[in-house]
Amino acid sequence: MKIALLTREPKNYSSRRLKEAAQKRGHKIIGLNVMRMGIHLDTEGPSIDYKGKPLSSYDAVIPRIGSSVTFYGTAVVRQFEQMGTFTLNSSHAITISRDKLRSLQVLSRYKLGMPATAFVRDRKSILGAIERVGGAPVVIKLLEGTQGIGVILAETTKVAEAIIETLQSTRQQVIIQKFVAESKGKDLRAFVIGDRVVAAMRRSAVGTEFRSNVHRGGTTEAVTLSPEFEATAVRAAHILGLRVAGVDMLEGTDGPQIMEVNSSPGLEGIETATGLDIAGDIIKHLEDQVRFEDFDIRQRLTLARGYQVAELPVGPDSEFVGKSVKDSGLREKDIVILSIQRGGIVIPNPRNDRPILAGDLLVCYGVKSALQNLVPDLNARRRPKRKVAPPPPA
């Protein structure tokens, strides 16, 4: 297999380990600087130049796109996708994960644990946003920050307000997050490959520093995650569409609290802490997946005129409660259940004898006219207004 490793740092630890692992398994892997590539589009189809010359064909791409070149880097990854080349992480998934706000917006829909977060632009809304996330102390994060840069702990409301106003005046976009006090100075990094966590480590800050990033001098130790933390990490990666991800979580009193999902997690810290061959696991997963082309299931399936993909929530009074997939009568209406989402579990391609329970979410594909009669109307789908907790006492 011929693999393109997209990286601007071919000699760093992660690049070297991926090359070693690929070569050990008999593959040819070539490091390519994504910024030296040219994208070309014409009636003959998409193509890529490298250093001004046509790029030869590759079987797979491993994107290691730095945050400073996300826009151009993901455009190159997207070009490979249009040329039919398998990419370990898709351009769409990388783009979503790189946007801290957007990724948290997506994850919040699925009721995963995360610190309360706010994003406001109106100066008059800052105090209300701080109260909404639980009051000071709060963590203020730049949307563009990486490796702990642009992450500030504000101990009081006045300090937080001043920091936010200052950053906004310089056209910086920031989010406000609840400070999870019980995790001060510590977090977990779960390394997800495919449908499992292959390794995990706890990162601890040094001294009075509250940021545990290794780049800021933090220490690491290997850990075995509980099933709850492992399931949360895998689900977060899958929701964002990432095959390989580093999921950073805090250990809150209410369970795992997702901070960030990284689409290009470094290998040095996790391999050093655990002694595991993570690079080898990545190459093995690439081998298993390279035969499968990336595509948007909703885009592909809805191309057939009159058909649609839809989510059908099963309420306690639903006609489907207690019935099996076969007895639901959906197949007779030309509707196929693709999966059942039950709490934090996804049941793909459910068997005919699988029972449907109240609270399930059925992901279906079928005739649009039949689905329209089953999808709740807008009023039924509106969520009740969230109760806002009163501000903490001064």
Image (cartoon, grey):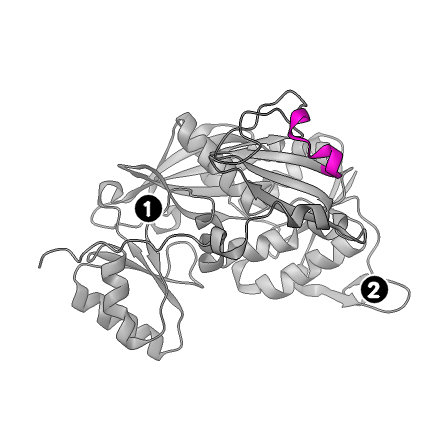
Instruction: Name the element at disc 1.
Output: loop
Residue 329 lies, with reference to residue 154, above or below; the image says above
Q: Residues within 10 Å of mark 2 (few under 14, many from 20)?
A: few
Answer yes or no: is residue 103 visible.
Answer: yes
User: Can you name the residue that lies furthest to the right here?
Assistant: 44
For this view, does 164 lie left or right of residue 289? left
Q: How many marks?
A: 2
Q: Which residues are magenta?
A: 326-335
Q: Position of residue 58 (x, y in %)?
A: 80, 47
Let me know if residue 327 is in the magenta part.
yes
Instruction: Name the element at disc 2.
Output: strand
Which circle's residue, 2 or 1, is located before the other in the chain?
Answer: 2
User: Can you name the residue that lies furthest to the left here?
Assistant: 394
Q: CA distance from mark 2 to mark 1?
A: 44 Å
In terms of secondary structure, what is the magenta stretch mainly? helix
Residue 150 lies, with reference to residue 31, above or below; the image says below
The residue located at (19%, 67%) in the rendering is: 159
Let me know if residue 110 is in the magenta part.
no
For this view, does 234 lie left or right of residue 53? left
Q: Position of residue 14 (x, y in %)?
A: 56, 44
Q: Nearer the viewer, residue 302 or 224?
A: 302
Quarter assignment of residue 155: bottom left
**Amino acid identity at mark 1:** Ser
Mark 2 touches mark 1? (CB < 8 Å):
no
Q: Nearer the viewer, residue 90 or 134?
A: 134
Mark 2 sits on what residue?
A: 53
Task: Specify the quadrant that holds the N terminus.
Answer: top right
**Amino acid identity at mark 2:** Lys
Mark 1 sits on what residue?
A: 212
For this view, does 223 lie left or right of residue 22? left
